[in-house]
Amino acid sequence: MSTTLIQALLSGIASGALYGLIALGLSLQFGVMKIINFAHSAFLMLAMYVSYWLSMKAGLHPLLTLPLTALALFAIGYLTQRYLIDAIYQKEIAREPIGVLIFTTGLWIFMNNAMLTIAGPDNRTVSSPWNDGLLIFSDYILTYPQVASLAVSALATAGLVGFLKWTRLGRAIRATGQDREAAGVLGINSARIFQLSFAIGLLVLGLAGGLLLSLYPVNPFVGDVFGMRAFVIVVLGGIGSIGGAFWGGILVGVLESVGSQFMPVTYAEALIFGLFLAVLYFRPAGLFGVEKE
């Protein structure tokens, strides 16, 4: 294997891990609440702006903005679910209320245009020596933000999997996702679980937004590209599968990076969406999901 190809593979793994982290919260929200949050990309954009303001206005190191951005997105997610989305659930009897899809679509458009009014259309970047730092080993190079993206994404995924598997609250979240009515019979408050699940999904997205800021400029519509990738990754990895979202992100990142070595970038993008359509047709549960009735 050539040095160029190995370099592309390493870069693809690093970017793919970040893609997986972006998709992680979306997968959790769908797995528990059975809704598609079309405003996911707008919340990612908001996370990047929060991290940008913390870095440029408060003078924080890009890595130090991550926990603060995550906490801010957790609070925003909790309030959004409790005071906006919960009201739709209470008015609709359907298991997957279509009103939530319409609401999150409207929220996505509103947030993008509100930020356009507040921050303007210009691209904004964070200037930091850390962003330009290089980790060199043998003939291969990764930037510090790429290494941080890989490490934080892997740790966040492992932490969320462990939380859902080993804690009392995590087991309650899983039970609600598997059967909301049965969980209610056992005394689990589904409304509270929904609030926490939505908030945790945005907490993870806050980490992703802070990491993404060191790699891409932020503008009011930056989340749309990555939001589309997140939907593809959720389907590839298996809808509702946390680990599947991470590995699906790795797969997309590698296909994107390595594929661009053999074909134009636009063709590599087409390859990803072609795989998405094939998986959706032949294995709707995803590559790492479990078939259910």
Image (tube, grey):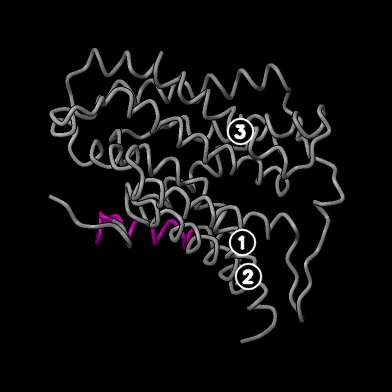
Residue 106 percent location from the top left of the image? 44, 20
Instruction: Give the magenta part as a residue range.
Output: 270-285
For mark 1, does the 10 Å Cα neighbourhood hold few (<14), some (14 to 19), or many (20 or more) residues? Answer: many
Badge 1 is on which residue?
14
Mark 3 or mark 1: which comes first in sequence?
Answer: 1
| Residue drawn 60% across the image and 72% down it | 9
Q: Quadrant of residue 28 in the image?
A: top left
Towards the viewer: 50 or 223 = 50
Q: For the stretch drawn in magenta, what is the main secondary structure?
A: helix
**Vertical placement of 110 versus 33: above or below?**
above
Residue at point 76% right, 76% down? 137
In which quadrant of the rendered view does residue 103 lie? top left
- Mark 1–mark 2 CB contact (< 8 Å): yes
Q: Secondary structure at mark 3?
A: helix
The amino acid at mark 3 is: Met
Q: Are marks 3 and 2 in contact (CB under 8 Å)?
A: no
Measure how far apart labels 3 and 2 are at the Cα level.
Answer: 26 Å
Quickly name the residue at label 2: 10
In space, the residues marked 1 and 2 are separated at their CA atoms by: 6 Å
Q: Quadrant of the N terminus?
A: bottom right
Residue 222 on image: x %, y % = 63, 37
